[in-house]
Amino acid sequence: ITIINSEINNNVAVDTSYGGGVYLSGSSTMSIQGSEINGNSTQKGGGLYVTDTSVVNIGFTTINSNISTITGGGIYAFAESDIDFVNNVVISNNQAQTFVGGGIYTTSSRFDTLKYALINNNHATAGGGIFIYQASIFIQNVTITENIADSCCAGIRYFDENVENNNNVKIINSIVWN
């Protein structure tokens, strides 16, 4: 599936409770380029919900003002899904109303590449910008700023009961501020 120069706006997922704007599962592959995912809502993954072994490549795209009533306001990545931000991705003004991961929530998944992105003004209980739970992520040239968390960790929150997995997060040439 390829989405180019498109808008996915103001959708509500009621029956599935996943992926207000986009829901991707199975072993699907998707490319989202030059697009907007704005104003969508659901319980998990207000803008984008990715699960199973699905792969998503995102570039020159804005994920903005999406709401999840539970987790992953902008993006919810689950299972063995793989999401790559290639260039100029903006994750802003998203909200996880009652739990974690205002901008991005990732669990048991891989964000192999999160490059050249801005993650700002997102809101959650914890991990306002990004909440990482038992997942791996590589962050390079990313600005994470002005996110809000009601309890802790407004920018990035990493949690894994297995302390041996603490090499799963790599941050290079990035800014986590305010």
Image (cartoon, rainbow, N blue to C red):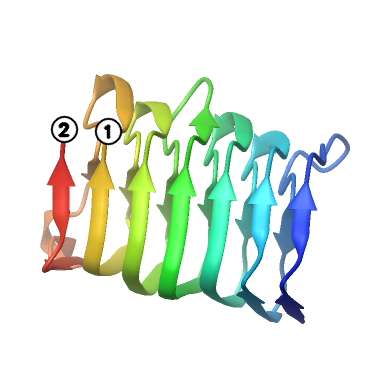
**Residue, disc 1:** 146
User: How far across and how far down the image is residue 110, in percent?
Assistant: 40, 70
Q: Observer-nearest residue: 23 or 134? A: 23
Can you name the residue that lies furthest to the right here?
15
**Residue, disc 2:** 178
Please, what is the three-letter code of the amino acid marked with disc 1?
Glu
Do we see residue 81 in this rendering? Answer: no
Task: State the CA–CA distance, disc 2 to disc 1.
Answer: 5 Å
- The tag earlier along the polypeptide, 2 or 1, is 1
Q: Observer-nearest residue: 53 or 11? A: 11
Neighbours of disc 2 within 10 Å: few (<14), some (14-19), many (20+) = few
Say which mark, if any, is on residue 25: none
Q: Quadrant of the N terminus?
A: bottom right
Please, what is the three-letter code of the amino acid marked with disc 2?
Asn
Q: Secondary structure at mark 1?
A: loop
Q: Is residue 14 above or below residue 62?
A: above
Q: Is residue 59 left or right of residue 26?
A: left
| Residue 141 sits in quarter | bottom left
Q: Observer-nearest residue: 26 or 127? A: 127
Q: Secondary structure at mark 2?
A: loop
Contact, mark 2 vs mark 1 (Cβ under 8 Å): yes
Residue in the picture at 74% in, 44% down: 20
Q: Quadrant of the C terminus?
A: top left
Do we see residue 139 in this rendering? Answer: yes
Q: Is residue 158 left or right of residue 130?
A: left
Total labels: the figure holds 2
User: How far across and how far down the image is residue 41, in percent?
Assistant: 71, 35
Residue in the picture at 77% in, 54% down: 8
Q: Is residue 107 left or right of residue 2?
A: left
